[in-house]
Structure formats: structure tokens, C-alpha cells
Amino acid sequence: MASRPLLLGHRGLRSRSFSVRENTIAAFDLALQHGCDGFEFDVRLTADSRPVICHGARFAGITIARAACSRLRALPLLEAVMERYASRAFLDIELKVPGLESYVLDEISKFPPQRGYVVSSFLPGVLLDLRGRSRSIPLGIICETRKQLSAWRELPVDYVIAHERLITAALIADAHAAGKKVFGWTINKKASMICLANNGVDGIVSDKTELLVATLRSG
């Protein structure tokens, strides 16, 4: 490997071997304890405009977008995550819905990430809105299909965050030639981790943080 890729936990981590829920402080802490450089996490917006951390649109039978934050006390707040980790982890901040842009920019301003970050989304409109608000914020388009992937050249992004099955050596070379970085997700097999690292991928997002670190950490 010319250089080691960033090693990132997916939603902190997602493993039956550990009794922690994804997208929680416990999961984020454990990913860092395992030796990851940082982690990916998901942000949604409550009915009273509080950014909370959750992957799905519903939590414990409650639709997040229709509920007050007081009904979702088990979900971490974005502010708490930024305050706790901005100085010590690379943060992949995924915006699941529109309407979060100003809140995320405010939190980044209050707690500037010291080890790097990217604000990512499947939603091109969210990324375009963010770029209109800030020329310097690093942005990433998340791609799960070839159609989604085909748009990366036309978007004002710095990162191409592609599903494992979409990543090829040619994609990595093309993105690098365009000045972009490539992250792969969700990479849970040792052979895939090694292959992507050898092909020059810039970051690997995995549920299996212990395996990721054991496989790719040098020295």
C-alpha cells in the first residue's frame, strides 16, 4: 500500500459481538477504542428542528420527523457528538434528509473537526445546497447504484463514497485524476479490505471495526 486508507466504523460499529446499539456514543467510543480513525454516522431532524443521530426514519415505533426531541431521548444529539469527537476522530456526517444544512454548518463552526471530516448524502440537492452555503466544506456523494455513481463528475463533491460492488481500480484512478477521494462501504471481508487498500482507496467504512484495524493497521 502506498498509504494506509482511513479506517472508519459504520454507524460506529454494527456487530453482534458487542452489546451496543449502532449510532450511539457507546458504538462511536468502541470504534475508536478498536483503533479506527473515525466513524460514519447518520443525522435526521425532529419535528422541533433538533438534529439527532439515527439511521432509520423511525425509532422505537416513533417517526422522527413527526416527533419532538423530548420523545427521542435515547438518540444522541448532533451537538453532543460533535463536541465529544471533533478533536479526536475523522467524522463522516451523513445527512439523511433535507433541512439539516444550516444546523450542520453551525455545529462544524462551533466544533471544527481536527482530524478531518466529510459531510455526505445520497441526496444531490442537499449537497448542492451545502455548496451554495460554503465553498470550503468537504462534501461526499454516497452511491449504491450505478445510476447514482454516474453523477459524481457533475456534482460539487470532494469524495465519492461508493458501495463495495461499485468500486473498481478504474473508478479510483478516475476519481483521483479528478482530485476526488474514494471511500468504500460497507466492507466487512478481510480480502475486500486488502484489495481496496492495495488499489489505493482513501477510506474504508466497515461494520467490523476490530477486523478492519487488525487487517490494515500497519506496525
Image (tube, grey):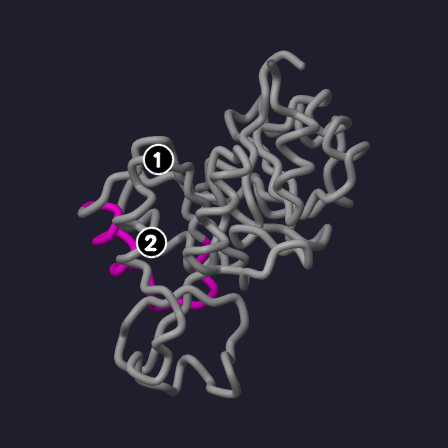
Q: Position of residue 107 (x, y in %)?
A: 24, 52
Dot 2 falls on a residue whose secondary structure is: helix
The amino acid sitting under disc 1 is: Arg
Q: Residue at x 32, y 67 (%)?
A: 51
Query: Which residue matches tag 2?
Result: 81
The amino acid sitting under disc 2 is: Val
- 71 over 197 or under it: above or below: below
Locate the N terminus by quadrant.
top right
Dot 1 falls on a residue whose secondary structure is: loop
Name the disc covering residue 88, or none.
1
Image quadrant assignment for residue 115: top left
Q: In the shown orientation, is residue 150 left or right of residue 112?
A: right
Image quadrant assignment for residue 185: top right
Closer to the camera, 140 or 42?
Answer: 42
Residue 106 on the magenta span: yes
Image quadrant assignment for residue 134: top left
Q: In the shown orientation, is residue 134 left or right of residue 148?
A: left
